[in-house]
Amino acid sequence: MISSLLVLILTSAAVLLSRWIQSRVALPVLTAIAGYFPFAMEAQVSFARGFLILVLWTLLLSVLILWFSRREPERMERLIWRSSEYSDSMMRWIETGELPEGSARQVIFFHLKQTVLYCVLAFLSLNFLALVLGSALLNYMNFYVAQLSRRSSRAGSALWMGWNPWSVIRVLTFLYLGMVVSAPTMWLLFAIPWSLSAVLLLPAVAGLLLDLFLKLTLARRWSLRLHKKLR
């Protein structure tokens, strides 16, 4: 499929170019551009194909950032927005079991604020700015996972466990949600075969609730498991 090949070529080129020019702004913007054009091609065919191309873009971007962050941690720390701040907060969570956001109420408020921002950006920009934000969030998450793996005595286990189950669900939910809420504005430029509807929103709402439920109920136990991987 042409769009899959484009994702592979453009995303790799975007990461390499950003790494070369060492721009924290360029990395999320260029990688979002790399994913957006193949997404726009597939979105005009079907919702499912548009979503799957975004999942492919996310996976490829994650692999690239993980790879470079393990090999060149100092360089990638300078390149990735909030890399050190986020990693430090997650390492404290692993040590103490206390989530970076704080109490359950603070977790819910933070997630709500982030979701609203993502939706507004998706609606106003035909989903493009939402992908810019998504790339920025994804990049510092992958940087943290890479550093967790580097510090761990069992690097392989730490690498896959670093991606908490609720974080995986949130990424997929945000990709889906951005497509749904951007439908009214995307329709102005693209002949997309779907529209904003309550039926399409239901899986996104379910994903957001599942994300919160898992985070609030599993976070402490998951941090203990990760703590063991660092020994």
Image (spheres, rainbow, N blue to C red):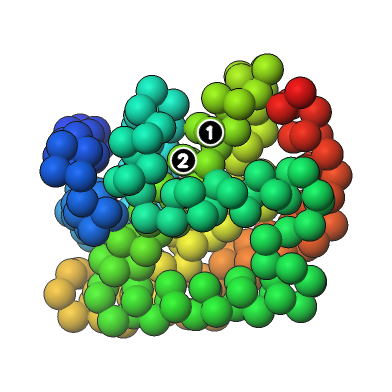
Placement of 127 over or under 123, stated as above or below: above
Residue 147 numbered mark, or none:
1
Tell me the quarter of the picture where residue 121 sits.
bottom left
Amino acid at the residue labelled 2: Phe
Tell me the residue at 28%/81% (across/down): 124
Give x and y (percent) for residue 68: 35, 29
Residue 143 numbered mark, or none:
2
> Is 51 left, or right, of 154 in this rendering?
left
Placement of 200 over or under 227, stated as above or below: below
Placement of 202 over or under 55, stated as above or below: below
Number of numbered tags placed on the structure image: 2
Alpha-carbon neighbours of circle 1 within 10 Å: few (<14), some, or many (≥20)?
A: many
Amino acid at the residue labelled 1: Gln
Look at the numbered disc 1 and give the secondary structure of its residue: helix
> Is 189 left, or right, of 83 in this rendering?
left
Give x and y (percent) for residue 38: 21, 49
Tell me the quarter of the picture where residue 173 sits.
bottom right
In what quadrant of the picture does the N terminus appear?
top left
